Amino acid sequence: FSQLAIEKLSRTHRSSSTMEPIKCKAMVAFGVNDLREEEVIVAPPKAGEVRMKVMCNALCHTDIYTLSGQDPEGLFPSILGHEAGCVVEAVGEGVTSVKVGDHVVPGYTPQCKGSDCMFCMSPKTNLCPKIRGTQGKGVMPDGTSRFTLAKDGSTVYHFMGCSTFAEYTVLAEISIAKIDPAASLEKACLFGCGISTGLGAVWNNAKVEPFSSVAVFGLGAVGFAVVQAAKAVGASHIVGIDVNPNKFEMAKKLGCDVCYNPKDHGDEPMQQVLVKNSPTGFGFDYTFDCTGNVNVMRSALEAAHRGWGQCCLVGVAAAGKEIATRPFQFITGRRCFGTAFGGWKTRDAIPMLTDKMMKGEIAVDHFITHRFNGVGETTKAIDALHSGDCLRAVVHYC
């Protein structure tokens, strides 16, 4: 879609936005790996809510994770999707931070900014719990859904508080980040999850220092963002680990000095390979798991430097999975922690990251490897993501 098309849509909404239900196309997940294009009815926003026209959506592995049935909070039928660029179509009572026509990026981690919210007031976390209880149940804060199937009126659940596999969606105001209307929505939508998570894991959670050594497990979009962020702060030695060697060329362009394929090392644990090849011979100052595989998480922890190494868990493990390691790993100075959305406070951070992108301070073009048109081509985007050579597939709805 062109900037002209976005501006035309915005003008139309400013002059004729109504509070009536909207019928539109959506990809509805009816069960495990059962995704179908359907017509849905999107209800008007209630108090504190915003209805938006979804202009484009970037497919994330979290969507596939839920569709595959591995997500303990996964609900069916539901509308997946959470990395999107949108235009506000209607606002509910009491909404003040956005207006009709504004360009926005949804955020699955809300930021209520309430003075009574100890999480929003604390610089230590971004985990605002304001609507967590209902979001995890696939409904809006009042306990109901804004989606129904057009053919029979049955309820369709929300996903991660976003549900952007639809031409229109409804979010809580506290889950929406207003961005510069001059920004490319195709690029800005990447800050809705994966890229922000990778950048923030380095800058906010681990606080990687200049001249440090870094090991990144999993060279997908999130892993590449970690590499990019580590390079930006001056890490002196960065290594990438992945079973797909086709990713190594891009990894090295972004900042990796060396890349390792575990398949090349037989039965030798990857952490042993890394430790003996680390700059000091005692491991890496910072390690990041971007795979969600608990065995890889152990490798990441045990590859962290003796005495002070830090391991950041970025990938989300399947339901019921647990991590195993020897307590001695911690006794000898290693620390392990996780990150959600890179520690960013959504409504403050996404506009800031978008501005940095527009100024050329954060490059994101290389993440978009595939493009598709129309909600129905979401299935093609999923196939692309499974192909192994896709970082982000963006589906344009307009």
Image (cartoon, rainbow, N blue to C red):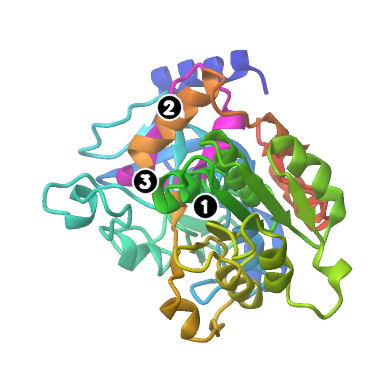
- Residue denoted by label 1: 163
Task: Tell which tag, 1 or 2, sits nearer the viewer.
Answer: 2
Residue at far top of view:
4
Query: Which element type, helix, strand or loop, lies under badge 1?
Result: loop
* Circle 3 crowding by C-alpha within 10 Å: few under 14, some 14–19, many from 20: many
Residue at image mark 3: 175
Pick whichever, 38 or 378, lies toward us: 378
Q: Nearer the viewer, residue 314 or 30?
A: 314
Cα distance between the residues tagged 1 and 2: 19 Å
Residue located 50% across and 58% down the image:
148
Q: Residue at x 55, y 15 (%)?
A: 8
| Magenta stretch encompasses residue 322 | no
Q: Position of residue 372 (x, y in %)?
A: 77, 38
Amino acid at pointer 2: Ile
Q: Residues within 10 Å of mark 1 (few under 14, many from 20)?
A: many
Q: Residue at x 58, y 51 (%)?
A: 213
Disc ID at residue 179 = 2
- Spatial separation of the CA atoms under disc 1 and disc 3: 12 Å
Residue beneath the point at 82% across and 62% down:
261
Q: Earlier in the sequence, mark 1 or mark 3?
A: 1
Check the picture and name the quadrant holding the C terminus. Answer: top right
Q: Secondary structure at mark 2?
A: loop
